[in-house]
């Protein structure tokens, strides 16, 4: 059944500018935004009426009614309504994992082309009723007579009316992601200055990417936004140094500047076999070579919540016989500047590499000038599931512009997970 | 025997009053019990550049299974990795909420007085981040082992640092200096096991010398380091002696308890509870050394540990002291020990690898009013240890002493209250020690992997102001 594996091409990407929470996209739903991102991709690549192998996308914060978010979105686009779709969710790894899933089917020859993407809104977030009220409402719905209904309603208490608001915290530790990273950052001795420098560079790089037109065929304006709303082209280490810490207590080093803000947005990438792209006169920006996913025990174990990529990358490198230095660009998702720096320090550290990775030598340092060359989440914002699509498309295009090279992609995710991948041109 | 003030001061109302009035509140010292971790929290390892001990210390800390951090320096990280120590990074610029139970600093890299600054650089940011009853150990090279006058000067200076830090750190924390002879790196484990754990609760401000022992350092069970050893403990029926017997037995030793015939019942109760055996005799009797040697030969062939604990006080000012009082104290506390050791060595009962531990006293170091006889005997014990150490080293036998300060016993309970309170409070712990504190120090010196300790006199005095 399985013939030779095929190469998987990244053909193109499209996203809407990312907005800060409760602003430009406050009234847009996940479905609205994902549909917009998909439709832009369709328009860019002339896919109107085309039946693709599949569309895979997801959202981290999702209303229960959106159980078929991706399929519903596809039916709102100009793709053929015969295009199947399904939802995935792996926290912030959703977008990249979706791309790996689609790529695997293309490689196996099960499909020829597909779209991977993701969307998230922290503005139109799902509120749920508390468990007490929910149980009562279910009872009410099941009651057969008005007397029974009255009896059930007599059980309503004022405290039940408070809705359950989705929170950015780990269910098993009760700590927010920022607090987790504050601990990891302290473990690695990550300084405020390093974080602010990384942040300022992210803004400068993203601004430069917009200015040179790099984003023109990657981003489609939406609801009045043309660029990412969080981007501060004039950001500087001096300005960032003025911000107060928000995680890690009064002596903390993590601020609203060097942490990603809650944001809204959607992104999608078109993946295909080389033949499929050639037949349509579409470019092959780069190939998605492989992916790897890792998870760490941040609850009972002694590992940081966002450190899984530090494990996933060396595992993947060993599998394909590459070293950490064999890359021309590194796309390390900036959930927090501290996360990126902790990961890099871990790879440079003799103790981590020996005790936790079981290696005789550290993976070593990377050339920092190759890191997030077109900016990353600190500047662009980070609508959780949309980040993977943004990164895959931008990294593929960068390799295409350079005429060749290799990119390492690394994305940390809630639940102690990490998704990583390699692109090659 | 109880320190009522410390108990009261640590009660809810007592805390209120001591805070308001500004009275000292002695920390209730943590003490080790079986099953406890060696180090009850995170240990931070630092070093002056060019030090030679980081790798060996990391290996020892890893063997304790302790959680650890190191300064972020390539040499330390590489040393930790090679030692299998999964240490976090400590960056003083980003302290976070880090707290440490132990600080270990390798100062052997300091070869010039200008480099003593490294002490400030390492300890300044962390000294306030220590937990109650934390442990600080500075490792150096003994001045006599250094290569130059400058290095000797700088290494000698460490002593002033540790003794001063011991006085200001507070919270029941202890500070020690360990001089490690070049080549003796492998002999460090037993000393760190003692000084970094709650076993050394009442030992502070001490200088310990670790030398190179002949032969391979035996591996020991962390929880029963004296497993299979036979230990003779004199004066074992009461007080510190009973505590010594109990701690050595806890650490795995078979106890041969010795005391005078009138205390036979008390002795039997102590050794019986520990599964040991009893030997009643008066150690000053002419035939005592032969009796002891014969008993040990018969029952065990040889003895691994001899603890000379038996001792008495017969206090009088010198002008009022009769010669009998003088003679009796000197004979029991010093001369009998010499006679017993001589015979045990001659008869081969004390064989290669065995340990002699003597009990000296702070009175032998600082002197004490009304104790010319006692002070003479206990200073003599210290002298005996230092004189015999190089002689016994040739037979791979070690001899060391502990010098207790104010220990809560029946003996100190009989001291008038004013003097007793002064004795209790005039030390860095603001309290008296317990017999178990002396016993723990003896168990450390008696351990099979303590071959590098020879000729040390270690005070168990909470860093007393007396004789410091």
Image (cartoon, coloured by chain):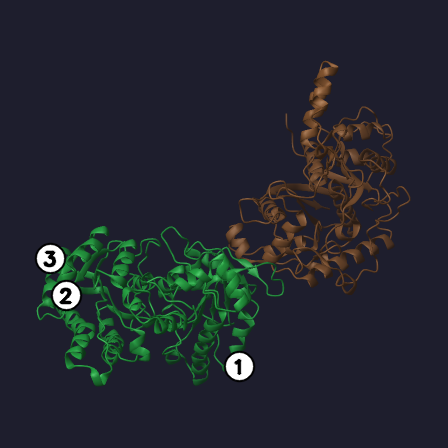
Measure the alpha-carbon separation of dots 1 and 3: 60 Å
Regarding mark 1 in the picture, which secondary structure is present there?
A: helix
Regarding mark 3 in the picture, which secondary structure is present there?
A: helix
Residue A256 x, y percent position in the rendering: 75, 54
Q: Which residue is mark 1?
A: B114
Q: Is residue A212 visible?
A: no
Residue B142 x, y percent position in the rendering: 39, 77
Depth order, front residue of B457/A263: B457
Q: Where on the picture, by quarter, is residue B126?
A: bottom right
Chain containing mark 2: B
Write down which chain is painted brown.
A
Chain containing mark 3: B
Q: Which residue is mark 2?
A: B348
Write down which chain is painted green.
B
Measure the alpha-carbon separation of dots 3 and 2: 13 Å
Depth order, front residue of B47/B172: B172
Label whose residue precedes the other's in the sequence (1 or 3): 1
| Residue at image point 45% right, 77% down | B158
Regarding mark 2 in the picture, which secondary structure is present there?
A: loop
Label whose residue precedes the other's in the sequence (3 or 2): 3
From the viewer's perspective, tell me whether residue A314 is left or right of residue B201.
right
Residue B303 x, y percent position in the rendering: 19, 61
Depth order, front residue of A132/A327: A132
Q: Is residue A96 above or below residue A204?
A: above
Q: Which residue is mark 3?
A: B298
Neighbours of disc 3 within 10 Å: few (<14), some (14-19), many (20+): few
């Amino acid at each position: 059944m399985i013939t030779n594996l095929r190469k998987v091409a990244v053909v193109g990407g499209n996203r809407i500018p990312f907005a800060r929470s409760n602003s430009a996209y406050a009234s847009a739903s996940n479905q609205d935004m994902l549909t917009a991102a998909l439709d832009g991709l369709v328009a860019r690549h002339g896919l109107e009426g085309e039946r693709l192998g599949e569309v895979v996308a997801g959202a981290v914060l999702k209303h229960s009614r959106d159980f078929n978010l991706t399929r519903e979105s596809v039916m709102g686009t100009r793709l053929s309504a015969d295009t199947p779709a399904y939802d995935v969710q792996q926290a912030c790894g959703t977008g990249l994992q979706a791309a790996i899933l689609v790529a695997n089917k293309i490689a196996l020859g099960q499909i020829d082309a597909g779209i991977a993407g993701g969307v998230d809104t922290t503005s139109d977030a799902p509120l749920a009723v508390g468990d007490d009220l929910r149980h009562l409402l279910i009872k009410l719905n099941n009651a057969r007579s008005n007397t029974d209904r009255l009896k059930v309603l007599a059980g309503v208490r004022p405290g039940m009316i408070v809705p359950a608001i989705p929170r950015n915290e780990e269910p098993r530790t009760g700590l927010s992601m920022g607090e987790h990273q504050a601990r990891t950052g302290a473990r690695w001795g990550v300084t405020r200055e390093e974080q602010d420098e990384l942040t300022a560079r992210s803004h400068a790089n993203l601004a430069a990417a917009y200015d040179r037109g790099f984003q023109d065929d990657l981003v489609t304006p939406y609801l009045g936004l043309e660029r990412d709303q969080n981007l501060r082209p004039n950001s500087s280490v001096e300005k960032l140094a003025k911000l107060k810490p928000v995680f890690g207590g009064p002596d903390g080093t993590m601020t609203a500047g060097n942490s990603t803000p809650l944001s809204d947005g959607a992104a999608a990438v078109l993946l295909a076999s080389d033949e499929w792209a050639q037949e349509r006169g579409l470019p092959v920006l780069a190939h998605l070579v492989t992916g790897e996913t890792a998870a760490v025990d941040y609850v009972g174990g002694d590992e940081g919540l966002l450190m899984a990529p530090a494990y996933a990358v060396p595992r993947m490198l060993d599998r394909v016989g590459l070293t950490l230095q064999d890359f021309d660009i590194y796309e390390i998702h900036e959930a927090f500047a501290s996360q990126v720096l902790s990961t890099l320090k871990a790879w440079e550290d003799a103790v981590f590499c020996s005790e936790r990775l079981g290696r005789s030598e550290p993976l070593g340092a990377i050339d920092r000038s190759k890191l997030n060359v077109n900016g990353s989440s600190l500047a662009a914002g980070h609508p959780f599931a949309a980040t993977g699509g943004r990164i895959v498309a931008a990294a593929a295009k960068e390799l295409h512009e350079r005429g060749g090279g290799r990119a390492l992609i690394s994305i940390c995710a809630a639940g102690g997970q990490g998704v990583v991948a390699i692109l090659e041109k | 025997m109880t320190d009522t003030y410390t108990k009261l001061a640590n009660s809810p109302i007592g805390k209120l009053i001591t805070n308001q009035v500004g009275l000292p509140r002695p920390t209730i010292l943590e003490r080790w019990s079986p099953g406890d971790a060696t180090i009850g929290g995170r240990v931070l390892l630092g070093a002056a550049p060019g030090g030679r001990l980081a790798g060996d210390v990391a290996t020892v800390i890893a063997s304790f299974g302790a959680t650890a951090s190191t300064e972020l320096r390539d040499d330390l990280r590489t040393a930790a990795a090679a030692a299998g120590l999964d240490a976090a990074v400590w960056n003083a610029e980003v302290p976070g909420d880090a707290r440490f139970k132990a600080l270990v600093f390798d100062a052997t890299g300091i070869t010039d007085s200008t480099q003593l600054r490294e002490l400030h650089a390492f300890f300044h940011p962390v000294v306030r981040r220590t937990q109650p009853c934390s442990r600080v150990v500075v490792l150096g090279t003994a001045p006599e082992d250094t290569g130059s006058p400058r290095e000797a000067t700088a290494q000698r200076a460490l002593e002033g640092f540790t003794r001063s830090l011991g006085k200001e750190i507070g919270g029941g924390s202890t500070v020690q200096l360990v001089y490690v002879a070049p080549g003796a790196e492998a002999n460090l484990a037993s000393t760190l096991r003692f000084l970094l754990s709650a076993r050394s609760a009442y030992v502070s401000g001490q200088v310990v010398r670790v030398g190179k022992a002949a032969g391979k350092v035996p591996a020991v069970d962390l929880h029963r380091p004296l497993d299979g050893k036979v230990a003779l403990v004199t004066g074992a029926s009461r007080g510190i002696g009973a505590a010594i017997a109990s701690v050595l037995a806890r650490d795995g030793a078979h106890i041969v308890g010795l005391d005078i015939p009138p205390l036979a019942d008390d002795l039997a109760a102590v050794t019986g509870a520990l599964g040991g055996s009893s030997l009643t005799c008066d150690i000053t009797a002419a035939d005592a050394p032969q009796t002891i040697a014969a008993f040990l030969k018969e029952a065990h062939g040889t003895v691994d540990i001899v603890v000379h604990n038996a001792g008495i006080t017969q206090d009088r000012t010198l002008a009022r002291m009769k010669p009998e009082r003088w003679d009796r104290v000197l004979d029991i506390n010093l001369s009998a020990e010499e006679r017993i050791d001589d015979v045990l060595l001659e008869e081969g009962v004390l064989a290669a690898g065995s340990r002699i531990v003597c009990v000296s006293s702070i009175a032998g170091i600082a002197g004490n009013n009304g104790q010319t006889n006692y002070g003479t005997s206990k200073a003599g014990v210290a002298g005996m240890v230092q004189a015999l150490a190089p002689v016994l080293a040739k037979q791979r036998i070690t001899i060391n002493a502990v010098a207790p300060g104010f220990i809560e016993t029946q003996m100190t309970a009989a001291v008038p209250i004013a003097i007793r309170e002064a004795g209790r409070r005039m030390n860095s712990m603001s309290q008296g020690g317990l017999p178990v504190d002396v016993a723990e120090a003896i168990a450390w010196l008696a351990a099979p992997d303590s071959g590098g300790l020879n000729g040390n006199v270690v005070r168990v005095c909470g860093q007393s102001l007396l004789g410091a």
